[in-house]
Image (cartoon, grey):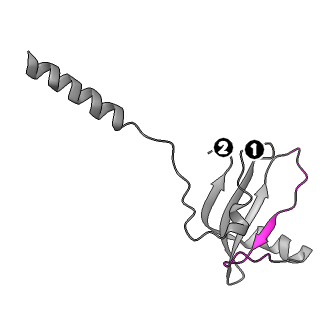
Amino acid sequence: MMKSICFLIGIAVITLFSCDKAPQLRLDGVPSSVTQHISDNCMCDPRIGLFRWDEQLLYVHWSIGPACNTVASYYDEAGNPVALTDDERQAFWEEKELVKMIWVCGE
C-alpha cells in the first residue's frame, strides 16, 4: 500500500514538472536596436525577421495589419539602421529571402 502511494505521488510530481512551459524567444545575437521593437501591443500584427537580400543580411521590423499605415524599419547585422530608397524597398520586398523569423507578436 505504501509503495502504491509513493508511486502515485512520484507520478504526480513528474507530471507537474514535465508540463510544457511557455516558449522563450531565442534572441541570442539579435541587436538591441532590433529587439527594442518587441512589445505586447499586437494591434498592427508586428513582426521581426532576418532576411537575405542584395548580398547582405537585414533585420526588418514591419506590420501586416490591414488597417495600419506603418513603415518598415531596416537594420544591418550589427543593428545599425539602414536607409533604403523607395526603389530599394520595393526591390527588397520582391526579392528577399527569409532566413529566420525572429518574433511575431502574439506567438
Q: Does 79 appear in magenta? A: yes
Instruction: Kindly indicate the quadrant of the structure image that contains residue 53.
Output: bottom right
- Residue 90: horizontal and vertical position, in percent? 85, 70
Specify few, some or many for label 2: CA neighbours under 10 Å numbering under 14, 14-19, or 20 or more: few
- Kindly check if marks 1 and 2 are in contact, taking CB atoms under 8 A apart as contact: yes
As drawn, 92 above or below 19:
below
Residue at image position (85%, 77%) is 83
Report the amino acid beneath label 1: Cys
Secondary structure of residue under mark 1: loop
Q: Which residue position holds label 1?
A: 42
User: As drawn, is 44 to the left or to the right of 10?
Assistant: right
User: As drawn, is 35 to the left or to the right of 22?
Assistant: right
Q: Which residue position holds label 2?
A: 106
Report the amino acid beneath label 2: Gly
Secondary structure of residue under mark 2: loop
| Dominant secondary structure, magenta | loop
